[in-house]
Image (spheres, rainbow, N blue to C red):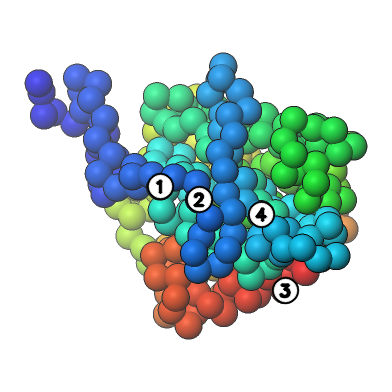
Amino acid sequence: MSDELAHDFSPMIKVYKDGRIDRPWGTTTVPASIDPQTGVQSKDVVISTAPPVSVRLYIPKSTTTESAESTRKLPLLVYFHGGGFCIGSAFSRIYHNYCNSLVSEANVVAVSVDYRLVPEHPLPAAYEDSWAALKWVESHFAGTGPEEWLNRHADLNRVFFSGDSAGANIAHHMGLRVGSEKLVGFKLNGIVLGHPYFWGEEPIGGEVALGENHREHLAALWRFAYPLTSGSDDPLFNPGKDPKLGELGCEKVLVCVAEKDALKDRGWYYSEVLKKSGWNGVVEVLETKEEQHVFHLINPSCDNAVTMLKKIVSFMN
């Protein structure tokens, strides 16, 4: 075996020249369950075998009590996990715990999407898998879809998308696709982008101070994920270069950024170009001081993470 590296994006992923792939972080998974802290129930559903796409579904405690509350349909959140398109899973502990908290606090139904990862499945595979998951969700519009939890509990006139980092990138593009392809089966009310992974050829704001290596690392990860990309100004990576930006298919967007995150200025920039795109919705930005990229997943009980969660909950309700 050769230890010569073809790609090194430590600590996320290393690809060796002999084809071996090492993901030291983000690969352990936890089973679906009834969460003892929140009473949220989850289960896994395979929605496609070729390509392999699965989701983890969550329903809050309110749906399982014997009351009028349990028959009321709830908003539906579709969540896309982060991890640079190359690590992470809807079934990992970090996302399982986060979805339990969000579903419990917001009293919503959630679908967490497990899409194929790069480099085994280069982009646009993750986008296509995510769209397949949305088409599957849409099939429940009349209450006659294949999954009883969605038929019974989800209000497809109140749908939200969210994701973090690469997952926020996916959430944005799914919102664009809903807007341009007009999914009739549900109404997308809003999108929450957590520390979105966007970039561009020209540095903006504080990116100039990041240093060449750091900027190149963020751009190189994108080229690794999407070998056929046109580069950092690809509309999939730089929404400011997307002529279709104004077609975003929802009426409100919440962009969450962290003060010490290298991607912070891209989140602010996204809000500015969205306002100028002809889109007729409302966008707001929540900036968390003193925090790093996806701090809310790494330390979900810290004060800033709790504040961010409350903001997301009020946005959805």
**Image quarter (top left, top right, bottom left or bottom right) of the C terminus:** bottom right
For the residues labelled 4 and 3, the Cα–Cα distance comes to: 18 Å
Circle 2 Cα neighbour tier, 10 Å, few/some/many (<14 / 14–19 / ≥20): some
Question: Residue 30 got which mark?
Answer: 1
The amino acid type, in three-letter code, at marker 2 is Ser
Which residue corresponds to the image point at 86% horizontal and 39% vertical from the top-left? Answer: 143
In the picture, measured across the screen, residue 110 lies left or right of residue 93, that is: right
User: In the rendered structure, which amino acid carries the disc numbered 3?
Assistant: Ser
Q: Position of residue 87 (x, y in %)?
A: 39, 41
Q: Secondary structure at mark 1?
A: loop
Point 34% across, 42% down: residue: 27
- C-alpha separation, residue under disc 4 versus residue under disc 1: 17 Å
Q: Describe residue 76's horizontal placement relative to residue 295 as left or right.
A: right
Do labels 4 and 1 touch, CB within 8 Å? no
Specify the amino acid type for callout 1.
Val
Query: Is residue 268 shown above or below 223?
Result: below
Disc ID at residue 116: none
- Whether residue 242 can be seen here: no
x, y percentage for residue 279?
84, 54
Q: Secondary structure at mark 4?
A: strand
Type of residue at label 4? Ile
Dot 2 and dot 4 residues touching (CB under 8 Å): no
In the picture of the structure, the residue carrying the numbered disc 2 is 33
2 and 1 marks in contact (CB < 8 Å): yes
Which tag is nearer the camera, tag 3 or tag 1? 1
